[in-house]
Amino acid sequence: MSFSFFRPSRPKTAQEFVKAVKDGLMGLDTKTVVEVKALEKALEEVEKNFATMRCMISGDGEVEPNVDQISQLASEICKEDVIALIVHNLHILGWEARKDLVYCWAILLKQKVGSTYCCVEYLENHFELLDSLVVSYDNKEIALNCGNMLRECIKFPTLAKYILGSASFELFFKFVELPNFDVASDAFTTFKDLLMKHGDIVAEYLNIHYDEFFILYEKLLSSANYVTKRQSVKLLSEFLLEPPNAQIMKRYILEVRYFKLMMTLLKDSSKNIQMTAFHIFKVFVANPNKPHEIKVILSKNHEKLVSLLHDLSGGKGAEDEEFEEEKEIIIKEIKRVSHLPNLEH
């Protein structure tokens, strides 16, 4: 389909315009479109509508956007179930229409009608649409568009909380390792937002789903894909140190299996991975309540660990000085543990 070079017309009212948008999207129903030309015409109409919507929301360089009209637009889009139609028809839309749609989506979600974000409220009443957006990472044609739309949704606590607790959340552990680099990277960006945007919600989720989450996360930390492994170690070091996750971190650093995993990552061929793993490893070692088995492992491997840490160098300047100080503290603690009596070897 060719791009439409036109100045979008401005309908008289938001209600009339949204009705046109809805009719256009419903015209994409493959059950009712018999001929290819009819579908092409319907797609062209939808593209024009989204270009017009973008113009209404952001202005066209000559006319400033009308705040009241945008508010009415958001309200009508919810009343007419256009949000559902948008999500269900994304895979049919052309590139230009999707680009305009993603732009409009971000603005409309933030649009208040009275005291409520009506589009967010609509999604709260139709959570299955969020599942549809997540699952769309499997379609590389629309994956990046859906990723952008999801990240706008995640800015709102209720929507982020639903995705975290949904069955579709586990799909991210698959999507971040998809063979298409752009899609996998985008999925990881969304995954990171889910774990970093709302600390209290994430802490609540991890408290309930601790075992299943970290079992899945362990696979990312052991991934054969360098990018996945590097990003996953870095993200783990970030969200474990978030203040709301203090209890999660205390629980994590008692786990022998994850301590062994950090020891393995300390020996990784990548310096980036080694350095990031060190910042998690040091918390295990510095823990004054180390489990007996971790003490035994430290004692048995103290010579190799000390040698490995001596060879590990940080960055430059003050950052390097701080790293060296931390490293010496950890080496000292490893040596202390190695001399403890009554440790099984």
Image (cartoon, rainbow, N blue to C red):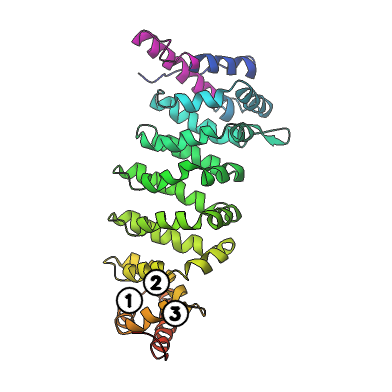
N-terminal-most mark, 3 or 1: 3
Kindly indicate whether the residue at mark 2 contacts the one at mark 1 (C-beta within 8 angstroms).
Answer: yes
Tell me the distance, in whole angstroms, between the alpha carbons under discs 1 and 2. Answer: 9 Å
Whether residue 194 appears in magenta in the rendering, the answer is no
Which amino acid type is marked by label 2? Phe
Which amino acid type is marked by label 1? Leu
Q: Residues within 10 Å of mark 1 (few under 14, many from 20)?
A: some
Give the image location of residue 99, x and y in percent.
44, 30
Task: Please tell me whether residue 14 is drawn above or below residue 297 in the rendered image.
Answer: above
- From the viewer's perspective, tell me whether residue 261 is left or right of residue 23: left
Q: Which mark is residue 312?
A: 1
Disc 3 versus disc 1: nearer the observer: 3
Give the image location of residue 205, x and y in percent.
55, 53
Secondary-structure class at tag 1: loop
Kindly indicate whether the residue at mark 1 contacts the one at mark 3 (C-beta within 8 angstroms).
Answer: no
Give the image location of residue 26, x and y in percent.
49, 15
Which amino acid type is marked by label 3? His
- Residues in magenta, as a range: 26-53
Give the image location of residue 334, x and y in percent.
40, 84
The residue carrying mark 2 is 278
The residue carrying mark 3 is 292
